[in-house]
Amino acid sequence: MKKISDFYKEYKIMQSLQLHQLRVAAVAMQICDSLSIEVDKKTIVIACVLHDMGNIVKFNFAHFPDFFKPEGIEYWKGIKDEFTEKYGASDHEATVGIVRELGISERIVELISQNRFNNLCLTQNGDDWALKILKYADMRVSPKGVLSYDERMEEANDRYKNNPDNVTEKERQELVSCGKKIEDQIFSVSNIKPEDINDDSIVSYLEKLKDFEI
């Protein structure tokens, strides 16, 4: 088995993206520990720490310039080109390709494959709790830390509003509403509230994830 840090190093995942994936996993761990139902925590955590491995192919280098230090933007543009050439221009397909390359179980590949904003209503109406937790945890973590669900949706909308592949405003509102219902579903079987999840609450989980093995 290898530590997740080894995979991040092997695939040249920048520190900010490493931290995002670890924060998502930490949020998921806190949720799993609070539930009154049984879930496969390890599978969920593995999906979380790998869910954005190909994300660099969609990077807009005008956003968050401080994230590209100390290597610099030109270095990361080169890594983006390498990933795009090998895995394609879709961040989602790149991530799935990398996860398959790692020999991760099909269950985890399936979770990551379905972890898409456009699938929110399908996720909400389904009975896959691992997928609900993965998607919700991802929707609570911005590039700079944990936000409330509503704050995160506003942040993501501002960041992606000029994306030509974006959904219509009506569709976006419907999807955001489905995400809110996922939040309600999760906390109906949890002994904590959404506001109990924040940057401070996940510190101990981040510490555990430093040596997390896959």
Image (spheres, helix red, strand yellow):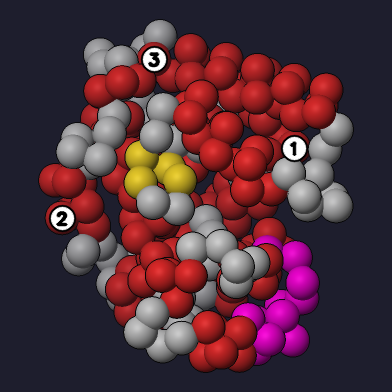
Can you say whether 192 is above or below 97 in the image?
above
The residue tagged with tag 1: helix, strand or loop? Answer: helix
Q: Which residues are magenta?
A: 79-91
Q: Which residue corresponds to mark 3?
A: 187
Q: Are marks 3 and 2 in contact (CB under 8 Å)?
A: no
Amino acid type for the residue under numbered disc 3: Phe
Looking at the rendered image, the quarter that the C terminus falls into is: bottom left
Residue 36 seen in render? no
Mark 2 or mark 1, which has the lower sequence index? 1
Residue 12 makes an appearance in the image: yes
Residue 204 within the segment the image draws in magenta: no
Label 1, label 3: how many angstroms apart (C-alpha)?
A: 22 Å
Percent of width and height locating residue 138: 49, 42
- The answer to the question of whether label 1 and label 3 lie on touching residues, with beta carbons closer than 8 A, is no
- For the point 56% across and 62% down, the residue is 63
Q: Position of residue 51 (x, y in %)?
A: 52, 56
Which residue lies under the disc numbered 1? 118
Identify the main secondary structure in magenta.
helix
What's under tag 2, amino acid-wise? Glu
* Position above or below: 8 against 75: above
Q: What is the CA distance from the residue labelled 2 to the residue labelled 1?
A: 32 Å
Mark 3 residue crowding within 10 angstroms, few (<14) / some (14–19) / many (20+): some
Q: CA distance from mark 3 to mark 2?
A: 24 Å
In this figure, which residue is indicated by the disc labeled 2?
207
